[in-house]
Every structure is written in structure tokens, then in C-alpha cells.
Image (tube, rainbow, N blue to C red):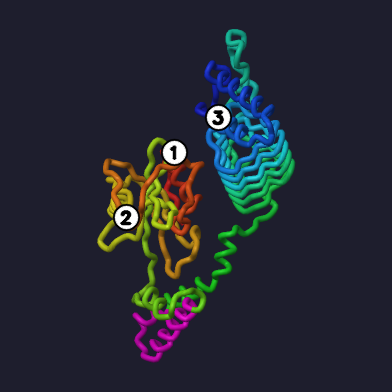
Amino acid sequence: MNYDENDFLETADHDTLEKIARARELTRKYYFSDYNDRENRNSILMELLGSMGKNVAIDTPFYCDYGKNIFLGNDVIINMNCTFVDNKPIRIGNKVLIASNVQIYTSSHPVLPLERLVSDWEERKTTFFRTYARPVEIGNNVWIGGGSILLPGVTIGENSVIGAGSVVNRSIPANCVAVGNPCRVIRYFSSDNERQKKSEKWLEWAVELQSLAQAGLTYGNDVYDKERYQRIRDISAEILAYKTDFSLEKVKNLFCNEIGYQTPKLDTRAAIFNDGKILLVRENNGKWSLPGGWVDVNLSIKENTIKEVKEEAGLDVTADKIIAVQDRAKHNLPLYAYGVCKIFVLCSVMGGHFENNIETTEFQYFDENNLPELATEKNNEEQVRMCFEAYLRRDWVTVFD
């Protein structure tokens, strides 16, 4: 692994030794606690860990260095005899299975002796070897097989499976099975989103037919060709009506009134942070989203972002940086019968306060590992986490499909 001076740690200073001693005491206390006393065991874990979601089970023995650098999502199971060397953050998503004897290391030592050994060994009498550390991240729905080892700096993509006994020295992508030493991908599989999108291929075809007919009706000259284009548009509308709960009349009103080439609609979403937490607004259905909405006529991306935040959260903001431009159909469900470009914008708060409105009922700031139920048709967990990463990285480069 390549590393720089910022990755190196002082492992024997007073504060570090206190963190280690605290973690040793709490893990000992957890080990000797009554296995059936869930309330007491959870209280120990909450004191030990950086954060912990709902329905977390950690079997004993469990070992860690600091504890406070471990962040767990919801529905996480960590089986017996696991070791987490958390000199840097270990972030674990939702619905993750970690089997027995798994070891996760955020720290290691340089390979070359001259880089590994300290020069003033005798004078220091504490830290004899140089140590560097990189964070480890495990995505949602991941299963780590028994006896696997994760090395510093790796990321395991969502839905992936790591075979038993693997040594993961490089990041593993989402939606795959990876095994071995070194761990390598042996096959990919479709995510739930991809399977649902394939099952809704009819929608993609209907939208394409509607788009072709729309252009033909506008730019075609032959009257008989226009009749054919109109019939194609009608077929598209009939497919949409047949496969949804919409009436044919409603489908035509929604999707069949535009002229010319069909172009995507624009949707802005604002990422606003305070003390490392992200602002979400609660919609009338109880779910949460980044403040935003369709870009209005005669408004720029920046102007619309500022307007939507004011309307939904009551805050005055500046729109500072574009985080990502994404094709909604590649990231969000359910699919729409028209194209949408989603634009995520990093913003800063200047003032203001929440006011009652017809779209949202409140706003709150949330930690990355304690997100509420999201309105996934507008922003899913992956997109919210992307905003966190953009906020933390000054060198963030805009992501676009």
C-alpha cells in the first residue's frame, strides 16, 4: 500500500494508551456480562462503540483497540472471536453478517525495515515500530465469511460476499462473490435494483416509443407518417396504462403532451452539513429526503437549489459545489416514464429557520450511520453517503454518469 506521513500514528502516547485501556476494560466487562441480559449488553456496546444502529448482535469474545472508531448500522451480526483493530474508522453498513474469527485491520507497518523501525529506540522506550492506518468500510447487505482478514484501506461494496478464509488487500466492488488469498472476484450477480429494473423493461420500451413518436410528430412532413407516429404514441400510452394503475387519459395527460425531442427533466438535491451531520427534511408520508425538487423554468441549477432549500427547510444557503450529476434510472426506483437528471449540490447555511409548508413537516440533522427511512425514489442511502464523502473530502471531483 502507498502511504504518506498523514497516515502514520503515534501508538504509545498518553491519550492512545488511555483509549486502549478503556476498550480493554469495556470488552472484558462485555465478555463477563449475562448473555441473556440484552439491555445491559447493549448499554456496554453503546459505551464502547462510536455508534450502533438497531438490532446489533456481537458475540463474545470480541476484541478491539479503541472501540470508538467502530460505527455499525442496523441489523448487524458479528460472530464470536472477531478482532477489529480500529486505529482508524471501521464503518459497517446495514444488514451485514460477519462470521467467526474475522479480523479487520486499519493499521499496519511499512515493509522496509528502515521505514518501519524508529531511530531513537533506546530514548523512547515506548513506540519501537512506525505504524500507519487507513479506514475500512463495509457496505450494506455484505456477508464476510469465517476467518477472513480485511487489511487497511479496503472497501467492500454493497451486497457482496467474501468467502471464508480470504485475505482482502484490495477493495472489492458491489454485487459480487470474492474469495482467496489475495481475495479476487470470481463472479458478479445482479443487485435487487437491477433485477427490478430488468423486470420493468417494458417501461423503458414504452418511454422510447413515446420519445420516437414525439419527435416524428413534430418534425415529420408526410401526413401518413404522422398517423403512424400517432399510433406509436397511442400504443406507448396503452402499455403504460395497462401496466400501471393510471387511466389511459391520465397517462396521455402526463406523458404524451410534449413536443419535439424528449429531454430529461432536472432535479436538484441540496447536501447541507452541521457538525458532521447531514440535513434531511421529513415529507408528508413520513420519509426523509435531501431538500430539493424539479428545476423551474428560468432558474439556474444554483438558483433552484437555493429556492428549494428555502421552501422545504426555511434556510438561506449558498450553493457551493456540484457533488454529482446522475441519471435517475441508474440509481433510483421506481422507474419513471421520462428521463431525470439528478444534481446533488453541496451547500452552506447562512441563516433562516424552519417554517410550516405544504411539502415537509420538519428537518433534522443525521449522522451517517443513523439515517432514518429515506424517500428512496428521491435519494437512496448510497447517494446520501456519497454526499458525506464529498463533504469530508476537499479534493472531491464531481461524479457523473
Q: Give the range drawn in magenta.
A: 213-241
Query: From mark 1 to mark 3, how far is it between C-alphas?
Result: 25 Å
Image quarter for residue 41? top right
Query: From mark 1 to mark 2, how far is it between C-alphas?
Result: 23 Å
Q: Residue 258 vs residue 378: left or right? A: left
Q: Nearer the viewer, mark 2 or mark 3?
A: 3
Q: Earlier in the sequence, mark 1 or mark 2?
A: 2
- Which residue type does callout 3 highlight? Glu
- Mark 2 sits on what residue? 301
- Mark 3 sits on what residue? 47
- The x, y position of residue 360, in whole percent, is 35, 54
Q: Do the residues labelled 2 and 3 touch (CB within 8 Å)?
A: no
Which residue appears at 51% of the width and 41% of the height?
369
Q: Earlier in the sequence, mark 2 or mark 3?
A: 3
- The x, y position of residue 83, in whole percent, is 67, 32
**Furthest residue in direction left, as rendered:** 298
